[in-house]
Image: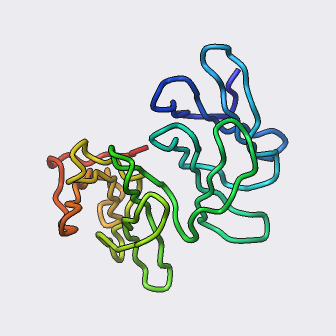
Amino acid sequence: QIANSSHPPLSPDGKFLVYKRVENEKESLWIRQIQTNSNVQVVQAGELDSIGGLAFAPDGSFVYFNAESPGGDVNTIFKVPTLGGSPTKFLSNGIGIGFSSDGRQIAFIRYDIAATEVSIILANADGTNERKLATQRGKRFTSTRAAWSPDGKTIAVGIGDDDLLPGPQYLIGLISTADGSVSELGSRKWANLT
């Protein structure tokens, strides 16, 4: 049974599923092997807080997720081996990692509270060579993990705009990976994007 989890992602080969459980207000992370219906706990209950943004590496060897260390860093991306092991910090000040289809690049979200801005950051798959791709400021913000187009030329993200409240405030933005230009996918606004 997968309890207390929504939208658990499958590994690219369809053999594993990763999900979060919450019991007694403590979060844990689990991997399920689909064929055998067996489960392995990869993050112990209470080891990390606010676990989210679950994603498999393109080869399925690691699970990436954002979480907070109790009393420590916030908005940190961790990784843990799919077949079990200890979670390790991958990137500071980042959430919502997404891999390019060729597995060579990542995109993630970074908040700068002082500057009241939210940026999409591109980097190599190992986290090196970061570069700011696009930034939302003021009442506009990036609201979902980056989803890469198959050719790697475009990233789709949810963009929120608080000026549109109380009506639907979200749109789907398309960001060029070449120059960071942002366009809207259609004109429809949404009440929620996950």
Q: Quadrant of the N terminus?
A: top right
Q: Residue at x 65, y 44 (%)?
A: 81
Q: Residue at x 48, y 55 (%)?
A: 96
The percent position of residue 134, horizontal first and vertical second, equals 29, 70
Q: Is residue 64 left or right of residue 152?
A: right
Nearer to us in this view, 45 or 41: 41
Nearer to us in this view, 141 or 102: 102
As drawn, 144 above or below 122: above
Q: Quadrant of residue 28?
A: top right
Q: Quadrant of the C terminus?
A: top left
Residue, far top: 36
The percent position of residue 64, horizontal first and vertical second, equals 57, 49
The percent position of residue 35, horizontal first and vertical second, equals 61, 14
Q: Residue at x 37, y 57 (%)?
A: 105
Residue, far bottom: 114
Q: Residue at x 53, y 37 (%)?
A: 60
Q: Is residue 68 left or right of residue 59?
A: right
Residue, far right: 24
Q: Is residue 13 left or right of residue 139?
A: right
The percent position of residue 130, horizontal first and vertical second, equals 41, 72
As drawn, 84 above or below 1: below
